[in-house]
Amino acid sequence: MGLFRKIKEMFQSSPVGEEENDFEKSIQISEEKNEEESKKKVDFSLENKQSFEKDSHLDVTNDCNQDVRIYEKGLSKTRKNFVSNLIALTSRYQKITEEYFDELEEILIMADIGVHTVIGFMDRLRDRVKKEKIENPEDLKEIIVDELFIIYVDDTILTNKIQYAETGPTVLLFVGVNGVGKTTTIGKLAWKLQGEGKKVLLVAGDTFRAGATKQLEEWSKKVGVGFLGKEEGSDPASVVFDGLKKAKDEKYDIVLIDTAGRLQNRTNLMNELEKINRVIGREIEDAPHETLLIIDATTGQNGISQAKKFKEITNITGIVLTKLDGTAKGGIVLAIKEEVNLPVKYIGLGERKEDLQPFDIEKYIYGLFKDMM
Ligand SMILES: Nc1nc2c(ncn2[C@@H]2O[C@H](COP(=O)(O)OP(=O)(O)OP(=O)(O)O)[C@@H](O)[C@H]2O)c(=O)[nH]1
Ligand SMILES: [Mg+2]
């Protein structure tokens, strides 16, 4: 069975209900009906999940239904555009021809998967068509999805987990050009981490833009977490210093530091990040534990070049890809993997606080292609 079929089976074996978790519900109902029957059903469901976990070395949890729904909803633009084009292509051709390959290549490039990634992908696909003697485009659909999945998973396992400090506060630094969604992401993540029982502090390291500190403070109030900011124009490194002192004194678990995206040039940005990093490293050993680069998915290849540039000036440990809900070209996730080789740790699938999701390639692939087969 292809990888995609396994993913589909896994998520559909516990379909997503409107109001509640149907997986749990189906257990309850069948228990009432017939104990024997229900046991069989539950065993089967769990077996499905376990066998997939074994195969895929990726985490699967039973309570992922809510998240799957956020993925499905957030990816609907890409599904309507990119995936619909793929489906239409398949129905237009009876046979796999050179024209078919050309059109497929174009659809993939239009989806922001990235030219290099697409070229490699097309080579592998042509190889498989030849070797497996595939003639009908219909039979190729599943292989296309599996090969897209493989681009991401590859043989290197990029972990999407946040590195936490062993003792003391964990420090996460957020960087990226202006308007990509740094502050919003911090707010959303604060909400998520607080919900996991962590004591969270937001530090307003963007003192450059008027209103930036206020915007972060509003998030802190909205989600009910700690905040430290100073007046506009303060030295960001000094704000960070004060923030870390507060975090240590008041025993915060996590510190999320916002930074300015709107600096005049690369040298200024580099110097400022260096200074902030120096302060962080001096105050807390091994910190920052993560430096997350925020990229706006709607900017496509521009986002990829931002990632390459930031990688040169500071030690980026992961990517947060925002506004995936706002693009019809959700292929950028795959381009980041191949062209930047940094793990996508979170994705933004909307503006609500619950719309920030840990990136999970299985949910992503399912959210995109669930209607294709
Ligand atoms: N649809 C959608 N909008 C988002 C998402 N993430 C952020 N936004 C919106 O993007 C806009 C910019 O977000 P900010 O968080 O202010 O961006 P920033 O990087 O902090 O910007 P600067 O402080 O100017 O550098 C806001 O209107 C957010 O609501 C997302 O995942 N989906
Ligand atoms: Mg901001």
Image (cartoon, grey):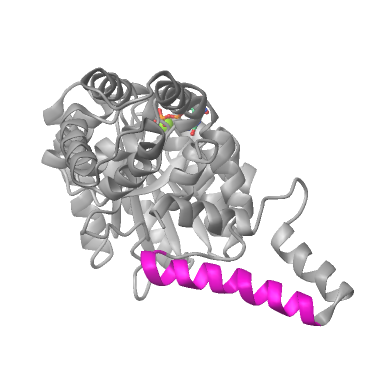
Residue 32 part of the magenta-drawn span? no
Q: Residue 205: in sight, yes or no?
A: no
Residue 53 part of the magenta-drawn span? yes
Percent coordinates x, y for residue 204 in the rendering: 41, 41
Q: Residue 344: in sight, yes or no?
A: yes
Whether residue 305 sits left or right of residue 172 in the image: it is: left
Number of dots carrying numbers: 0
Percent coordinates x, y for residue 112 in the rendering: 30, 26
Q: Residue furthest bottom?
A: 36
Residue at figure coordinates x 43%, y 32% from the top left: 181
Percent coordinates x, y for residue 363 in the rendering: 48, 49
**The one of 173 and 25 positioned closer to us in this rendering:** 25
**The one of 3 and 132 positioned closer to us in this rendering:** 132
Whether residue 67 sits left or right of residue 84 in the image: it is: right
The stretch in magenta equals 36-58
**The one of 360 and 211 positioned closer to us in this rendering:** 360
- In which quadrant of the rendered view does residue 232 lie? top left
**The one of 24 and 324 positioned closer to us in this rendering:** 24
Ligand 2, image quadrant it occupies:
top left
Instruction: Kindly report the secondary structure that dominates the magenta region of the rendered protein.
Output: helix
Residue at figure coordinates x 28%, y 50% from the top left: 150
User: Relative to 50, does residue 349 appear above or below in the rendering?
Assistant: above
User: Relative to 330, does residue 250 appear above or below in the rendering?
Assistant: below
User: Relative to 10, does residue 304 appear above or below in the rendering?
Assistant: above
User: Relative to 205, does residue 21 appear above or below in the rendering?
Assistant: below
Percent coordinates x, y for residue 71 in the rendering: 54, 42
| Quarter that holds the N terminus | bottom left
Residue at figure coordinates x 76%, y 54% from the top left: 20
Residue at figure coordinates x 21%, y 21% from the top left: 98
